[in-house]
Image (tube, rainbow, N blue to C red):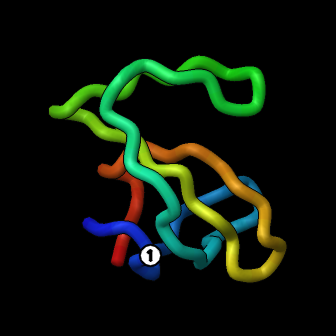
Amino acid sequence: MRQGQQVRWNTSQGETHGRTVERRTEQFTFEGQTFKASAEEPYWIVESDRTGARAAHKESTLRT
């Protein structure tokens, strides 16, 4: 997966489409929540195409 790639992921409202913004491989805090990212289990900050909202998701939950 690379920065700027179109991806989709599930939310409580259904499937959302967007793009990858930033890859994280170390523990980080995003919008008040702590995520335990690692090189083996990276997270991506993704941006929704529809709303422009950003969220953090495990790479394994993102589909291309």
Image quarter of residue 6:
bottom left
The type of residue carrying mark 1 is Gly
Image quarter of residue 31:
top right
Above or below residue 42? Residue 38 is: above
Tally of numbered tags: 1
Q: Nearer the viewer, residue 35 or 26?
A: 26
**Which residue is farthest right?**
51
* Mark 1 Cα shell of 10 Å, populated few (<14), some (14-19), many (≥20): few
Q: Position of residue 42 (x, y in %)?
A: 31, 39
Q: Position of residue 58 (x, y in %)?
A: 40, 43
Residue at 56% in and 60% down: 46
Which residue carries the number 1 mark?
4
Above or below residue 7? Residue 34 is: above
Q: Position of residue 23 (x, y in %)?
A: 39, 49
Residue at 64% in and 65% down: 47
Judged left or right of residue 60, residue 23 is right
Residue at 48% in and 66% down: 20
Image quarter of residue 15:
bottom right
Q: Position of residue 54 (x, y in %)?
A: 70, 55
Element on which disc 1 rests:
loop
Q: Nearer the viewer, residue 45 or 10?
A: 45
Q: Nearer the viewer, residue 64 or 23?
A: 23
Quadrant containing the C terminus in the rendered view: bottom left
Judged left or right of residue 17, residue 6 is left
